[in-house]
Amino acid sequence: MSAKAISEQTGKEFLYKHICTSAAVQNRFRYANVTSETDWDRLTQDHPWLLTERLVVKPDQLIKCRGKLGLVGVDLDLVGVQEWLKPRLMRETTVAKAKGILKNFLIEPFVAHTQEEEFYICIYATREGDHVLFHHEGGVDVGDVDAKAQRLLVGVDDKLSEDSVKEQLFMHVPDDKKEVLVSFVVGLFNLYEDLYFTYLEINPLVVNQDGVFVLDMAAKIDATADYICKAKWGDVEFPPPFGREAYPEEAYIADLDAKSGASLKLTILNPLGRIWTMVAGGGASVVYSDTICDLGGVDELANYGEYSGAPSEQQTYDYAKTILSLMTREKHHEGKVLIIGGSIANFTNVAATFKGIVRAIKDYQGPLKENGVTIFVRRGGPNYQEGLRVMGEVGKTTGIPIYVFGTETHMTAIVGMALGHQPIPNQPPVAAHTANFLLNSSTNAATPASTRTASFSEPRAANDATSAKKPKAGVPAAKATMLFSRNTKAIMWGMQTRAVQGMLDFDYVCSRDEPSVAAMVYPFTGDHKQKFYWGHKEILIPVYKNMADAMKKHPEVDVLISFASLRSAFDSTMETMQYSQIHTIAIIAEGIPEAQTRKLIKRADENGITIIGPATVGGIKPGCFKIGNTGGMLDNILASNLYRPGSVAYVSRSGGMSNELNNIVSHATDGVYEGVAIGGDRYPGSTFMDHVLRYQDTPGVKMIVMLGEIGGTEEYKICQGIKEGRITKPVVCWCIGTCATMFSSEVQFGHAGACANQAFETAVAKNQALRDAGAFVPKSFDELGDVIRTVYDELVANGTIVPAQEVPPPTVPMDYSWARELGLIRKPASFMTSICDERGQELIYAGMPITEVFKEEMGLGGVLGLLWFQRRLPRYACQFIEMCLMVTADHGPAVSGAHNTIVCARAGKDLISSLTSGLLTIGDRFGGALDAAAKQFSKAFDSGMLPMEFVNKMKKDGKLIMGIGHRVKSINNPDMRVQILKDFVKGHFPATPMLDYALDVEKITTSKKPNLILNVDGFIGVAFVDLLRMCGGFTRDEADEFVEIGALNGIFVLGRSMGFIGHYLDQKRLKQGLYRHPWDDISYVLPEHMSM
């Protein structure tokens, strides 16, 4: 959502900090906030003026008309303020229908003034520009300012001038105040624009000989502009509307939403309610709330919320567990119901999101059963059959009553079931599986295009696209009536390969001659080609780094589909509109600031370009063209007959609901001719009326369906068009959001534009107006399909529509990745791994989540145990591993590995090359004796050979005993590394038979020569054998296998890598030059010269 109300204190802080005006703005930053926890002594220290001045006190909780409600204390001293607060602070009060606790108050200096010094000013945004309302009489009794105030419209991209303010707003302002007011109003408007306000009202604004005083202020800002205004806004807190508490769970979901590319919303209406919802989609969430309220559940509706935009399994889990936690805190004598609903998804993998919900249900199965929770599920979209299966299974395994339904069931039918208004079917009809559509068993490999692409009721024309005409100078260009045809070509902005493939598959089932995507633009790579499928065949689509090259090389393109992010969508769209070949742009991104959207609309209107979006999935013209992910995957395209045109055109705000309309229309009529989702923002690029008029002028469209919603006034233009005779085709309309009038406090629904600011913007008022104008309006969304069917049947009966014979579409091969997702195929893997899994939301080491690794403080030794040995080793074993790494980390620069690393580093090589040079020296002669020592000593010990026999045999065979001997250390000068390890092993290992055997061998060898000691390699080798065999975590065969495959040498390699890296960094830090070995350290032994 975009426009959000801010507190009066926040609004004044913005004004005082950032307004630029020559007017003397008084009482800057002189306000104090009071709550039940306020320390008055501290407050007066921070604001000493509280002790010396007369004061005003009022609640700062988004309450309108505080003066008329007696909620403003005026001309009081501090004691008077405290007395005034006693009966009000933390007390419940009623404002209109809302009951709430007064808990946050604002104290400001009292400004003595006369009525003649009070003024009223308000600035608010509309599609056409920003309106400035000014009245020379402000204050509590200002009355109906819409009727009384002077009004000035500042168009999009225009500036407010001082002359226009004087001429159009200040007719009744005294001359001595005009200059001050002009400067202030212009400065206020510039502030309003710079800080992305959408509404700013000051009443009263006092102007006297001392300057300008902002007494009462109400404001909203465009929250989507946070990335632009963060430096000026700081951290803004958006208070809830009066009458609704701010819950930490709402803040938690808002934080998840901010960190996610998906949409996650939650508003708690009644925490004690028995009806809870978890709905996918902004439009669908409103429809479900409407239906619950229509069936009498408004008092028991606990929450409003939605999840959409393909959230991950973990995000859905976090969202679901929040809902389940809330609904299981208090029991209800009738039990509770959870409605997990949604329309037919366009691109969200339903099974993947349901996995997160299933996890949450399993975690909360105890509380859910204790609270008598019954769950009703209805969903459609990609892989929904698997999602419903998994949901049904969890019901059986947990014992929780879960009823699941797919696209065969009307979207909101589960609400009636949940509330007891209709029976629950025993065996709901089973929808065909995705594979039934995509792996078509029909023998018709292809169908003649002419039998399928002609409209069911429209004669084929040579060219069914009407392009925009070139405008005359200074005259806005006319927009195209027909946006898409079978020859439409598009450029895709963004590396959206899945969306492109979906468009190509749609093209193929529509029997288009060529793909609809001509090229892609992606600024973050160089020019290249991307591989896609055209039916069975692989094709290449060019990808360009910049827009200019794409446009120049593809002059046939007239549509751009923009998947640019909300931050880059504005610039990329403005760039696109420079090219005259483009007449339609679809903007998918949600969250573009409204001020930027209005600029896009203005430029598009000037250039004769139709914008679909922002915040949309796009649109579809069956048999011709579809935008991105519109219509979902091929199973839904085929199930809803979107591969060929019907006779019904629709326009909707919601993308998810547009897919539901595809389903409803396909079941009630001969199908969709064209459908567009204009987007959920307050200012969509094109309006309901734009598209309804296009449909009116398109011969193939015989009836029109419009799905409007609460907020805005666009639907009234449809009423006017019907009354004036501009729209003559039957129009079926329904506006969602009828539940809003039943709530005691304001609710901002999922779409940014879904909020009524006036009574005539409510869905109830719009539905009645449309009904009065002559549109076909059902009693509820549940009846929408029935009304569409009734109107369609009448058109068939009078011959307006002549249904054509169905012809099956050609078969489209299923992508391997999707077939595997559906479990339809299997393939042997190229690799196998058993130690790590990075595919989920959390990295897993040998079955242990990374968070658990840190939570239990397993350390490096514990991680090594998981990754190398697939075991959670005992604490002492982890410590021993870490000690081994420490003692083997380095042994000076003279050893061969360190020497090689140093030489390589000094030759200017990089870290990896230098490290590799050192590691390549590790073998039996240097550092690689761990494995060999472990093998030799184990073989001798296991064969029952006595230490003396072992020593004699090795001597007889002429072999060195690995792990015995040291160039420097001896029995008289022991290696302290070995001593440290020996003390630890003897003190912590349960048994050390192999070490004891090796120490006996050492006694024999040192008796012959004092430096033939058990060295650190040998000690680690034999001690590790004891660890593997005696810790209880391995069988004898497993322990021997780890020795055999080289695990022990890995300890030395890992440890010594630390030292090698240290030597590399040391040489770089010391800036050592190329190494050349000195001549005097080389013995040149050449053969003597031999004469012939």
Image: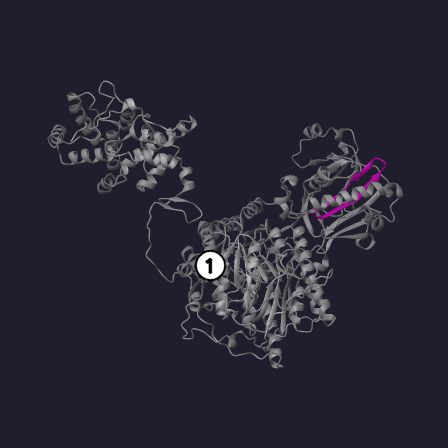
Pinpoint residue 801: horizontal percent, then vertical percent. Answer: 60, 78
Count neighbours of disc 1 (C-alpha within 10 A) and say few if under 14, some if 14 to 19, many if 20 or more.
some
931 lies left or right of 779: left
Looking at the picture, tell me which residue is in the foreground, 962 or 233: 962
Total marks in image: 1
Residue 553 in the image: above or below residue 727: above
Q: Quadrant of residue 804?
A: bottom right
Pinpoint residue 160: horizontal percent, then vertical percent. Answer: 77, 48
Residue 808 in the image: above or below residue 554: below
Query: Is residue 200 magenta-colored?
Result: yes
Residue 633 visible from this viewpoint: yes
Q: Which residues are magenta?
A: 197-219
Mark 1 lies on a secondary structure that is: loop
- Image quarter in which the C terminus is found: top left
Q: Quadrant of residue 50?
A: top right
Residue 963 in the image: above or below residue 670: above
Residue 745 visible from this viewpoint: no
Amino acid marked by disc 1:
Pro
Residue 170 in the image: above or below residue 578: above
Query: Is residue 227 magenta-colored?
Result: no
Pinpoint residue 77: horizontal percent, then vertical percent. Answer: 78, 32
Q: Quadrant of residue 799?
A: bottom right
Give the labeled residue for mark 1. 401
